[in-house]
Image (spheres, rainbow, N blue to C red):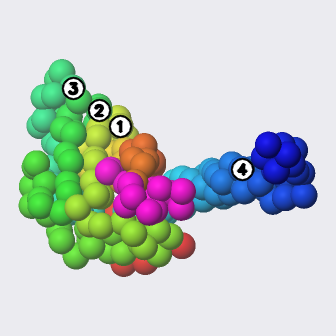
Amino acid sequence: MGTMRAFLFDTRAAGAAEFALVLPLALGLLFGIIDVGRYAWQLNEYEKATQMGVRYAVVTDPVTSVLSDPAVTYVGNTSCGDPLRAGDRICAAAFPTIICNSSGCDSGTLNSTAFNNVVGRIRDYQPRVASTQVAVEYRGSGLGFAGDPNKPEVAPIVTVRINNANYAPLSLSLFGATVGLPDFSYSLTLEDARGAASN
């Protein structure tokens, strides 16, 4: 009985036992802090990649043939009420929303070189982005005038989106789990839509 009592009240290894109990919690907290920092860093990377992708898209060749076709004119278009004459402002309703992704555009044909260049610009900032995650949208803005000889006549709002992005936290890496990131988008008004370079 004396040996059992001595064993129960022996405190010589108490520090090691407390350390063994606290260590998993401390490591979980440490990895959690690192994961939150990495999560915020990746959000910033994806946001910057989206911004640079749309900047590239507005100053280089359009992704859809609707904007690059020299035969397309808004002179005579009645979407804004009366038929447009040369020099009239093009209302937002005259230009349909066009969405392009890696499989094509819902209006016009996909300029795959221009699309791949936008994706390449995005990958300069976030290499994990796949071309299937990128979409480029053109939406009427009310800018531009019918009969503009410099083409395109309309200057739509260009939105670049990155969808279905995932984050792999360190704390869940043993289980192969990922956390979905929000969809990213950024918009600018189309500029000259010519060339192959952007700043």
Q: Is residue 134 left or right of residue 27?
A: left
In the rendered image, which residue does mark 4 sit on? 21
User: Which amino acid, by three-letter code, is at mark 1?
Assistant: Ser
**Disc 2 versus disc 4: nearer the observer:** 4
**Disc 2 versus disc 3: nearer the observer:** 2
Q: CA distance from mark 3 to mark 4?
A: 72 Å
Q: Secondary structure at mark 4?
A: helix
Q: CA distance from mark 1 to mark 2?
A: 5 Å
Q: Is residue 161 magenta?
A: no
- How crowded pointer 1 is (Cα within 10 Å; few <14, some 14-19, many 20+) is rated as some
State which tag comes first along the sequence, 1 or 2: 2
Give the x, y percent position of residue 62: 27, 63
- Is 168 situated above or below 112? above
Residue lying at 42% horizontally and 73% vertically, measured from the top left: 127
Q: CA distance from mark 1 to mark 3?
A: 13 Å
Give the x, y percent position of residue 98: 19, 46
User: Camera-side residue: 111 or 101?
Assistant: 101
Tags 1 and 2 in contact by the CB under 8 Å rule? yes
Tags 2 and 4 in contact by the CB under 8 Å rule? no
User: Which amino acid, by three-letter code, is at mark 2?
Assistant: Ala
In the rendered image, which residue does mark 1 sit on? 141
Q: Magenta stretch: give its range.
A: 163-177
In the rendered image, which residue does mark 2 sit on? 92
In the rendered image, which residue does mark 3 sit on? 80
Give the x, y percent position of residue 34: 66, 58
Give the x, y percent position of residue 81: 18, 21
User: Which amino acid, by three-letter code, is at mark 4?
Assistant: Leu
State which tag comes first along the sequence, 2 or 4: 4
Q: Secondary structure at mark 1?
A: loop
